[in-house]
Image (spheres, rainbow, N blue to C red):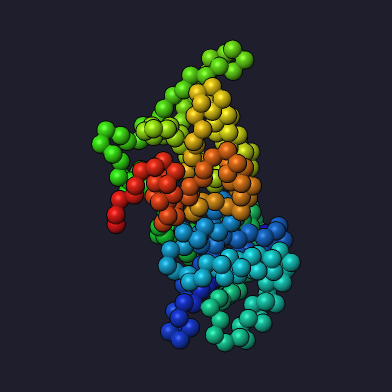
Amino acid sequence: MNGSWFLVKYVDDVFRNEPVNVGVVVTADRGVGSHFLGQRPDGSINGQRIGKRVSGIDTYRAWVRFIRKEAARGNLDARVESLSKRVGESYLIERRGPILDAEIEKTPQALADELFTALVSLDVPQAQPLVALAEDTFKQLAFPPGHGIDRNVDYQVKVRDVPQLLTFDYRYAAGRTTLMDRVSLSRPGKRLVQSVNDLLYRIEAVEKQRGIGNFVALYSGADCPPQAERQLELLNKFAHTVDLSAARAKDDISQIIGVPAQAV
């Protein structure tokens, strides 16, 4: 494989000039590979996995798009030359060296992943699992005595006279019943569609046969790529949606189920 590899750096304080490595790009005759801080498996950027290293997440995302676009066009060398003449930039792209070993069997992406592991520290805060976010949020609610959240709740329904057992992650029953389910929007492609369709199927069946009309889809905005927006819009038509990674999560659930949030 013949080509070049580039190291992308971010400078928070231009005066102090203390850059940190945030990404790697490999351009080769076999294609282009890249890996950036906060990158999800689908290539989108999760701002919450970057931590405090980079100021201005939207600007960072724009730079990542720009660098990938120029690399795909074969213009990265020219861009490095032009950017090197500008003073006071927060983002630097350095051409670190050629790739001349014809015996390398790795793809450009695999090589970029390896270089990223070696050159960009990975000790950034990991996004909390949905189940942990849900439990943390429930702890911030002031449930009345004798009431609380039921977990892994089953409902028996019939579909074409065939009994089926449908399970929801959470239930709150006091006056009216609210059923809640976790939805991982970070699942790629068909897995996400199937997950959403499964929840909608359970909502429709329980609503029709059990008379329950209050549903909540719990998700994390920290793991919500742009491709999931359509599925989130669909969920909004059947249920309340609550972003558990948002500071307002406890207030949202408080309003939906009618339980006051605890004072901070």
Q: Position of residue 61 (x, y in %)?
A: 58, 65
Name the image quarter holding residue 4: bottom right
Name the image quarter holding residue 132: top left
Give the residue at the far left of this rendering: 145
Q: Residue at x 39, y 32 (%)?
A: 175
* Front residue (pair 122, 5): 122
Q: Residue at x 63, y 59 (%)?
A: 33
Q: Position of residue 206 (x, y in %)?
A: 52, 26
* Front residue (pair 107, 151): 151
Q: Residue at x 45, y 86 (%)?
A: 15
Q: Above or below — where is 111 with respect to 9?
A: above
Q: Position of residue 243 (x, y in %)?
A: 48, 50
Q: Position of residue 21 (x, y in %)?
A: 49, 69
Q: Residue at x 73, y 68 (%)?
A: 74
Q: Quadrant of the N terminus?
A: bottom right
Left or right side of 93 for 253 = left
Q: Quadrant of the C terminus?
A: bottom left
Name the image quarter holding residue 185: top right
Q: Above or below — where is 161 with respect to 107?
A: above
Give the residue at the far top of this rendering: 161
* Front residue (pair 240, 139): 240
